Image (cartoon, rainbow, N blue to C red):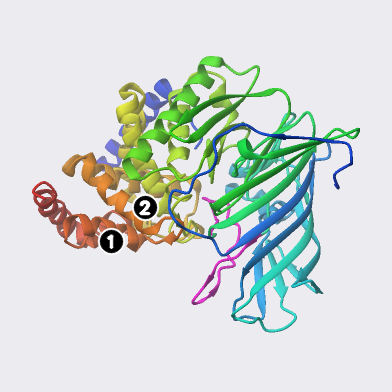
Amino acid sequence: MKKWSVTRNLVIVFVLLELIVWGTWSPMPIQADTIQTQAKGSAQKPIKEFQSSTKYQVNAQVDPDKHVVSGTLSVEFPAVDTSKVYFHLYPNAFRERSELSQPNWRYELGDDRIPGQIDIQEVWVNNQSVAFQVHNTILEVPFPKKANQNQLTHVRLSFELKVPKNNGRLSYDDHAIWLGNWLPILAVKEAAGWRLDDYYPIGDPFFSEVADFDVQIRVPKEYQVATSGLESQAVITETKPKGVRLYDIQGVNIRDFAVAVMDSSYHSLTSKVGDTLVNTWYRQDDDQAAVQQLHDVAQKSLRYYSNSFGAYPYREYDVVRTGGFFGGMEYPGVVFIQDRYFQEPNGYGAAVVAHETAHQWFYGMVGSDEIREAWVDESLTDYAAMAFLTQYNQKLAAPYIMRRTTLGHLADSYTSRGIVAWQSVDKFPDWKSYSDLVYSRGATMLWELRKAWGEDVINEALRYYCSNHQYKNATGNDVIEAFTHVTGASAKPYFQYWLQLKVDQEKQAFQWVTDGKGKVHTK
């Protein structure tokens, strides 16, 4: 009882300090009369030789007034030995249904929400119309005949998306629509079968493989877009007299394609980090000091992570002001940042941008199973943000690191409840347990290792991890293997102790740290 009382008081004092330092907390066919322009920007250059075998083509039209996106999607992929193929229809999670009144959904979506969904109108497989089925967030597409293993399969579908309004990744306000996880995406097929996971209300319940995207987006001419692709290299066509602007945008070796559609109240700060354009999109009435701070963090963190973990492989990175409850949300080449961080300079806003930028490596370049092993991307990402903030601004770094490490050490209290960091997102009872374990516990695990071995050793392990798994999906065991590689001794006990809360591994875990310290400093 006394021990719990001390712990509780520590947490109360810590939270009060956090509030003082940070502020509040929450984790159409083209007409004949056209004008074509080529957007300015550097040419894309390949960083690492890789050619995706899956290719998407999207033709979409956005109606900002009706909050509707309609169009077609085609995907070409290697034939699979199966009679069916599956796509995720994530927007259907936001249909009107009783589950959305549950606490975890209400935390994510808010109380003032408007339902939305994606309707699939017709599907063709290899130019043959097929009778498809929709099972909430899963589209089941039958093959008209068994696929030939030596051929590519081509699926084309038409859709209409009614964008929901809520506090999530897919929503809108009076000035913008942000489209996260909006497109039908091929499900991952593993040896054990297709991954047809639900859209859970905790974490980022997504899992995908890299592909090439060729996306045409039509918007009213007064609107502009930021995407996962290279809009700086987009061919932009304006049609008269209807006043429609068509963007033809490519994204290579990315695992999703997110879009923000913004009206003329949005402006951008643009800089270059190496060959990469960095754009921070804000509204004209935002606080300029806050905007400049977020842009500065985006640039400098991108450079820091490139030097630490391996070169950033894409030629554009967009930081976009949106609504939302989430602080920030990552997608390849673009991140959505909650509007309140653009209102005044805020230490936590800087940390959010640093965190989401690190996701470009841990989720973007190197994918992982965000459903069954959420710690793989979130723990590595949050450690990276802590490391960047330490050298960027100690005053900003200190409260963020204190929060993470305090909660990370207290998270062993979850042992008695059978809740650990290394488990599927559907096993977490609430957002707090997910955050305490997947973010704080996992990041603290790496921070403690950094204190023992130094930054260079951690970077060596993470560079090894990124280099070996770039454009692939890695696992938790791959992370362990990277740290085993650095020391020459199995890192498994250390990771089991921290992430699976196996107290019987504590002695072995810290012996590995001690033994490893001698090895890594005598190489």
Amino acid at circle 2: Cys
Residue 213 location (% of width, % of height)? 63, 53
User: In this picture, which residue range is highlighted in magenta?
Assistant: 185-207
Foreground disc of the pair 1, 2 = 2
Q: Which residue bears the numbered disc 2?
A: 466
Q: Locate residue 293, reporting x and y percent.
A: 47, 21
| Mark 1–mark 2 distance (CA, rounded to whole Å) | 12 Å
The answer to if 187 sits in the magenta stretch is yes
Amino acid carrying mark 1 in the image? Glu
**Mark 1 touches mark 2? (CB < 8 Å):** no
Q: In terms of image quadrants, where is residue 135?
A: bottom right
Secondary element type, mark 1 = helix
Q: Secondary structure at mark 2?
A: helix
Residue closer to the observer: 369 or 43: 43
* Residue at 38 percent of width and 37 percent of height: 385
Q: Residue at x 85, y 44 (%)?
A: 30
Tell me if 103 is positioned left or right of 73 in this view.
left
Left or right: 297 as drawn, with respect to 67: left
Check disc 1 and report the residue beneath it: 481
- For the view shown, which residue lies furthest in the right direction? 241
Residue drawn at x 30%, y 43% is 444
Q: Residue 334 in the image: x percent, y percent?
A: 56, 40
Q: Badge 1: few (under 14), some or many (20 or more) residues near its Cα, within 10 Å?
A: some
Q: Nearer the viewer, residue 266 or 166?
A: 266
Residue 491 in view: yes
Residue at left 66%, top 58%? 56
Q: Nearer the viewer, residue 48 or 197?
A: 48
> Measured from the top left, where is residue 294 in percent x and y?
49, 25
Disc 2: CA contacts within 10 A as few (<14), some (14-19) or many (>=20): many
